[in-house]
Amino acid sequence: MTHKVLVLPGDYIGPEIVTEAEKVLAQVNEQFGLGVEVEHGLLGGAALDVHGVPMPEQTLRDARAADAILLGAVGGPKWDSVARELRPERGLLGIRSELELFGNLRPAILYPQLASASSLKPEIVAGLDILIVRELTGGIYFGEPRGIRTLENGEREGFNTYVYRESEIERIAHLAFSLARKRDKRVCSVDKSNVLEVTVLWREVLESIAPKYPDVELSHLYVDNAAMQLVMAPKQFDVIVTGNMFGDILSDAAAMLTGSIGMLPSASLDKDGRGMYEPCHGSAPDIAGQGKANPLATILSVAMMLRYTLAAPEAATAIETAVSAVLDAGLRTPDIHTQGDRLVGTVEMGEAVVTQLRSR
Ligand code: NAD
């Protein structure tokens, strides 16, 4: 059986980090006989430069035909002045909605070797392992009507619509419960049901689905309290499930608990488990072309791809173990470097992970 993986390197550091992740993918492909076939495509600014649009038809066709997509990052100052509908980020949003990638998985894991990189005390964050499951294609970011209108008195008014259908809540709830089953079996649903009717429905739907997963414990928090708990006692959480906007904010806060954005992978899944995998960070134009970017978030995104779409958990674990071993050996890119560690660049870090895998 073969698996088709579409690689979209993107812009600025995108190609640098994706090159290293591809080396790792090639290594596990060979080692575990995964049958992965890789194709390449253009998305974002790179696509705009060649085709005049950030999401070319060809890329969309290839994305639909692929089992999984590995993305670097898109955007950057080169395209700051292009029209809004042509901006590189539009390509990313386009592909997410075209493929209905509704389930965004954002793990926040703190490697014990990097505990000192967090802004929180090591005892609060050491061993942190949270999975935030964010609804990605609905909610207030997509709700209609939306816009800015001028009232009769001449004053302008901005408005958006916060809307969720039951079916949208049900599918993200099922995803969260089934993921919790493979972890510590606890789901915390985050809403604002004391104020927003949409999230009253959200809570009701979560409660109605919970009995189908009797082995998983469901709890609820209002989003303001969740934000507070996340920075006060983050280790209390296992899986957090929430809507698009709250998830956007909470997942960035959780990411920062771990200290380095260069370490965090993500997945965006459709209803059949096919998905797009990418680091949480952007295209880092400030360090592009200098060989300094940390490739580990992208390499760990490959591990997520193997676990969640390609059904190769052993290969996924092998990558995660290799990353941990490389950190144990003291290798650090500049973003995670502290005194006494061995400073390495993007390529050296990527190749160290490959070497580690080979020595298994
Ligand atoms: P960014 O994540 O690109 O960079 C923020 C800071 O983190 C920078 O100092 C950068 O050097 C550092 N950083 C990021 N990734 C790193 C890595 N792998 N190793 C070491 N350091 C790293 O965020 P930004 O500067 O706000 O955005 C830059 C561009 O990326 C913008 O055009 C933005 O729209 C785009 N962006 C794209 C995505 C995506 O493709 N998913 C996500 C966020 C931002």
Image (cartoon, rainbow, N blue to C red):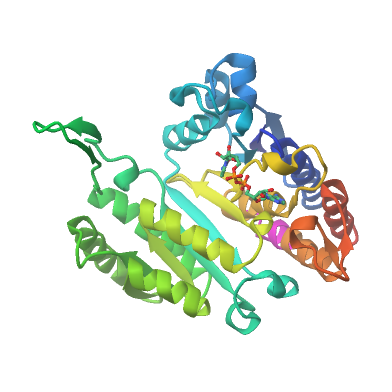
Q: Is residue 232 left or right of residue 328?
A: left
Give the residue at x 83% y 71%. 328
Picture quarter with ligand 1: top right
324 up-or-down from 271: above or below: below
Q: Is residue 287 left or right of residue 161?
A: right
Q: Nearer the viewer, residue 36 or 195?
A: 195
Give the residue at x 71% y 34%. 38
Residue 212 in sight: no
Task: State the image coordinates of residue 156 (x, y, percent, origin top left).
Answer: 20, 35
Give the residue at x 73% y 36%. 15
Q: Is residue 315 magenta?
A: yes
**In the image as oriented, which residue stretches furthest toward the left?**
152
Q: Nearer the viewer, residue 332 or 297?
A: 332
Residue 174 in sight: yes
**Range of the magenta residues?**
311-317
Q: Is residue 26 magenta?
A: no
Q: Looking at the rendering, in which quadrant would you find the N terminus?
A: top right
Q: Looking at the rendering, in which quadrant would you find the C terminus?
A: bottom right
Task: State the image coordinates of residue 164 (x, y, percent, origin top left).
Answer: 25, 49
**In the image as oriented, which residue stretches furthest toward the top?**
51
Q: Nearer the viewer, residue 162 or 105?
A: 162
Task: State the image coordinates of residue 78 (x, y, percent, origin top left).
Answer: 63, 27
Task: State the image coordinates of residue 202 (x, y, percent, origin top left).
Answer: 26, 60
